Image: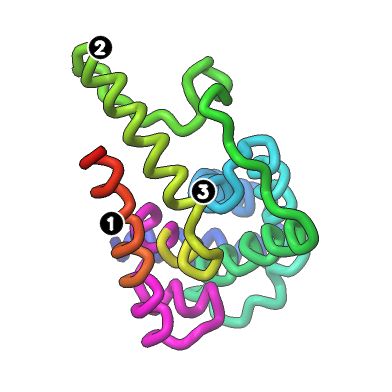
Amino acid sequence: MAADTDRLELWISQAKGGNLGAFQELYDHFARKVFNFIYRMIASSEEAEDLTQDTFIMVYRKLGTLKDNSRFEPWLFRIARNFVYQRYRRRPPPMVSVDDQDEAGRAAAELVDERKNPQEVFQAEELEQRVQQVILGLQEKYREVFILSAIHHLSYQKIAEIVGRSLPSVKTDIHRARLQVRNQVKEYLKG
């Protein structure tokens, strides 16, 4: 863990000095996380790719303004979050179709265990689609903290920094979001 932190600190310092290779390392390390965060917020892989690129362009331009290198990750996610909100301030994000496919031809939201029989695969796909619908149905303030906590496993403190709210507020919203997701999934499973 300390080695990862040291390596990130080095890349950040070098990237601030104009080292493109170090910036590429930062991009390689964080791009998938940023994409997944944005995708979970807006449910469009094309838009998520565009906003991920916009995020890293802004990071490249503004990296010199980052005063504390240890705050890079919350700063990065704040930039991504701001791009999502700027893009969708006047119009809601499109809903994901269950027929959307990724580059490999699989369902965009599919998380399937290949060892399952066809019935189990179908049930897992159906449940994953329902969970994605539930997440997309959360109020924005709950959705973003839920995604950062449950999917990206960020600490409450980092989430509070990203969303610019107090730690108690973030904890409360994560708790409420988890209850909503849990209750809606339970209802679905009962039906």
Which of these two is toward me, 1 or 94?
A: 94
Indicate the amino acid at tag 1: Asn
Q: Is residue 47 left or right of residue 190?
A: right
**Disc 3 and disc 2: Cα gap in Å?**
26 Å
x and y percentages locating residue 4 in the rendered image: 37, 58
- For disc 3, the neighbor class at 10 Å (few under 14, some 14 to 19, many from 20) is many
Residue occupied by mark 3: 40
To which quarter of the image does residue 84 belong? bottom right
Q: Which residue is mark 1?
A: 183
- Three-letter code, disc 2: Pro
Who's the residue at 26% across and 24% down the image? 113
Residue 11 placement (x, y as % from top left):
54, 59
- Please say if 158 is above or below 21: below
Q: Which kind of residue does numbered mark 3 sit on?
A: Arg
Alpha-carbon span between mark 2 and mark 1: 27 Å
Quick one: quadrant of the C terminus? Answer: top left
Query: Do residues under tags 1 and 3 come within 8 Å of each other at their CB atoms?
Result: no
Judge whether residue 171 is colored magenta. Answer: yes
Residue lying at 67% horizontally and 43% vertically, measured from the top left: 94
Whole-percent x and y of residue 60? 72, 59
Q: Judging from the image, what secondary structure is the residue with disc 1 in?
A: helix
Q: Is residue 27 visible?
A: no
Q: Which residues are magenta?
A: 147-174
For the residues labelled 1 and 3, the Cα–Cα distance comes to: 19 Å
Q: Earlier in the sequence, mark 1 or mark 3?
A: 3
Q: On the image, numbered disc 2 is attached to which residue?
A: 118
Looking at the rendered structure, the secondary structure element under dot 2 is: helix
